[in-house]
Amino acid sequence: MLDGMLILGAFVAACVGFALFALSQQRHWQAVAGALGLSSRRQRQQYALAWLLLTLSLALTLQAEGAGFGSLLWTLLISAAAFAISFTLAWRPRWLACLTPEGVVAARILKAWNKVRR
């Protein structure tokens, strides 16, 4: 049971890591958060956190399955996570809005302000 929880945690960490990699790019950030730009400091922070999450994912799979199968499982997990995030960005990018709360709130405020001004 513990091994399954570790593997699930590794998959979630990989998904969030790849989502942060994607959201560190202006195009994906704007698709999720609206018309607001992403600061270069925030970009670097997201990029660093994404690498940390992928490293955590590797550590969790190695803990659950050992070095031999854990590294193979990690490779498969990060491939599946990358596909899941790329399909999410193509189909429903707003689903990743939970990773950018301040961007979404600010975009909604700007959208409401534009409606009021018209």
Image (spheres, rainbow, N blue to C red):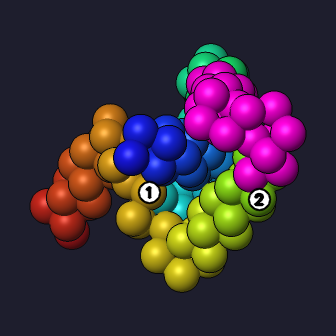
Q: CA distance from mark 1 to mark 2?
A: 22 Å
**Is residue 7 in view?**
yes
Q: Residue at x 68, y 65 (%)?
A: 80
Q: Residue at x 53, y 63 (%)?
A: 31
Local secondary structure at mark 1: helix
Q: Quadrant of residue 112?
A: bottom left
Return the residue at label 1: 96
**Is residue 27 in view?**
no
Residue 109 left/right relative to 37: left
Structural crowding at the residue carrying mark 2, measured as other residues with C-alpha within 10 Å and reported as few (<14), some (14–19) or many (≥20): few
Structural crowding at the residue carrying mark 1, measured as other residues with C-alpha within 10 Å and reported as few (<14), some (14–19) or many (≥20): many
Residue 108's tag is none
Give x and y (percent) for residue 1. 39, 46
Residue kind at label 2, given as amino acid type: Leu
Asked if residue 64 lies in the magenta stretch, the reply is yes
Asked if residue 31 lies in the magenta stretch, the reply is no
Q: 3 or 14, which is in the foreground? A: 3
Residue kind at label 1, given as amino acid type: Leu
For the magenta stretch, what is the residue range? 49-73
Q: Quadrant of residue 34?
A: bottom left
Q: 92 or 74, which is in the foreground? A: 74
Q: Is label 1 in contact with label 2 (beta carbons under 8 Å)?
A: no
In this rendering, the label closer to the viewer, 1 or 2: 2
Return the residue at label 2: 76
Give the mark nearest the N terminus, 1 or 2.
2
Give x and y (percent) for residue 75. 81, 51
Report the label total: 2
Q: Residue at x 61, y 45 (%)?
A: 14
Give x and y (percent) for residue 24. 65, 40
Magenta stretch prevailing secondary structure = helix
